[in-house]
Every structure is written in structure tokens, then in C-alpha cells.
Image (spheres, rainbow, N blue to C red):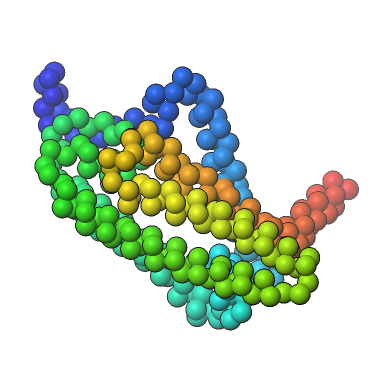
Amino acid sequence: MEWGNGSLHADFVLLGLFSGSRAPWLLFALILLVFVASIASNATMILLIRVDPRLHTPMGLMSYDRYGAICYPLSHRVCLLIVAAAWLGGSADGFLLTPVTMQFPFCASRDINHFFCEAPALLKLSCRDTSAYETAMYVCCFLMLLIPFSVTSASYNRILIAVYRMSEAEGRRKAVATCSSHMVVVSLFYGAAMYTYVLPHAYHTPEQDKAVSAFYTILTPVLNPLIYSLRNRDVTGALQRALGKCLSSGKVTTS
């Protein structure tokens, strides 16, 4: 595509998350800290599961359906099917949306007002009518978000009903505290995704899109291991054992 100075540009430019901020370096440092914490916590979980055989159980999958995992323990085959379905569903969505989106001509500015190439932000640069495709994309995203969110909510509702019938007050309090923290993360993720992909563009601005997208791309990944895994007794026990082995091996090496 030829621009005013006669040069050829075929690349898109991401304007970033802090394009209009007065203190971009402060926000960058905060996001970097959150990102490093997310990588470190998730890497710690992967390492613990790898080295501790006690964690080789279906309870890593409890975040998908805690009611099913608690009341109907998952077999190894069911675990693999759940993981495969999650990966295939997410991959199919990306592989379908990306090629179709890139088929539209982009004859205006190539500056994407976002911090990653999200389809709705990219479609705003097209010089062709994309309303039919946007409608189809909204319907697809609505179903892909609504179905798992509804299943997860129904699962937690059944847990809360069972908890309400418990006679022990202390156990009821702990169960409600655990489930409520899980539902906060679930609501943050699905709420932000629905806001971005389901709500019409007339009801939100690009700045609001970037802020909301940060919730399900930056915030929830760092909260997931803290809420779903590191608060679990088996995981904390595995972490203590791993740290104990590291400390004991260090003392032996020093002596």
C-alpha cells in the first residue's frame, strides 16, 4: 500500500496499552510485575506437578467443573478429553477468525488502537462493510462464552446448594469462601470477554476495550494459580516438600 511519502507499508502497528497515559513507565512497570508473577506462579505449578507424584490426580481439572470433580471423581480418560476439548475449542476459534478477518482489505490507517491483534480492533481499519461478519462473530463468541459460563455457574450453584445443607458451620464458611473466590475469577474472565466480543461497539470505546482486555489477558492468569492451586493443601504441601529438598541439598553441598 502506498502512502503519502511513496513508501510501501504492509505491516500493522500496535499503539499499545498506554498510548494516552501520562505515566506510561509506571504502568509498564506494574504490568511487567504482574506478568512476571503470572509466569512464575504458573511455572511453579507445572514444576510441582512434574516432580511430585501426589499431584498426578484429576484435581487440577477441578476449575473446569468442581461439582463433577468433587462428587464424581474424574478418570484419566475424562481428564484428557476435557483438556483436548478446551484446546481444540480455543484453537478452532482462532484458526477460524484470523483467516477470515485478514481477507478484508485494509486501505486506511494500519495503526491498531490496541495492545494485541484482536479481531474487533482490526476490523475497524477495514474499508469494506464488515457488519455481516461482525454479527456472525458476535453470535459465535456469544455461544462460546455463554455455554461454558452457564455450565460453570450451574456447577457452582449445585455446590452452594449442597453447602447450604451442611450442618457444620465452619465447613460451610470455608466452602462458601472458596467458591466465592473462584466465582470472582470466573466472572472477571467471562465478563470481560463478553464485554469485548458480545457488546456492540457503540457501547464502548477503544480505551475501554484495552482496559477490559487487560482483565482476561493479564489479571486472570496471575489469579488462577493463586486461587485454584496454591491455596490447595496438596499443592502447598508439595511446595513445602520441594523447598525442603532444595534447602537440604544446599546444606549438603555447602558442608
Give x and y (percent) for residue 152: 49, 66
In this rendering, the answer to whether 62 lies above or below 184 is below
Q: Quadrant of the N terminus?
A: top left
Does residue 92 sit above or below 19 in this rendering?
A: below
When the figure is inspected, residue 113 is found, relative to residue 118, above or below; the finding is: above
Q: Nearer the viewer, residue 182 or 231?
A: 182
- Up the image or down, 187 lies above or below 214; here it is below
Near-viewer residue (247 or 235): 235
| In the image: residue 180, left or right of residue 251 | left
Whether residue 35 is visible here, answered yes or no, is yes
Residue at 58 percent across and 50 percent down: it is 223
Q: Is residue 49 left or right of residue 191?
A: right
Does the image show residue 115? no
Which x, y percent locates residue 163?
A: 67, 71
* Numbered label tally: 0
Q: Position of residue 36 (x, y in %)?
A: 57, 41
Q: Nearer the viewer, residue 254 or 189?
A: 189
- Residue at the spot 72% in from the left edge and 74% down from the top edge: 166
Q: Nearer the viewer, residue 190 or 35?
A: 190
**Residue at the image position 44 percent from the left and 54 percent from the top:** 190
Q: Position of residue 219 (x, y in %)?
A: 52, 45
Q: Residue at x 45, y 75 (%)?
A: 81
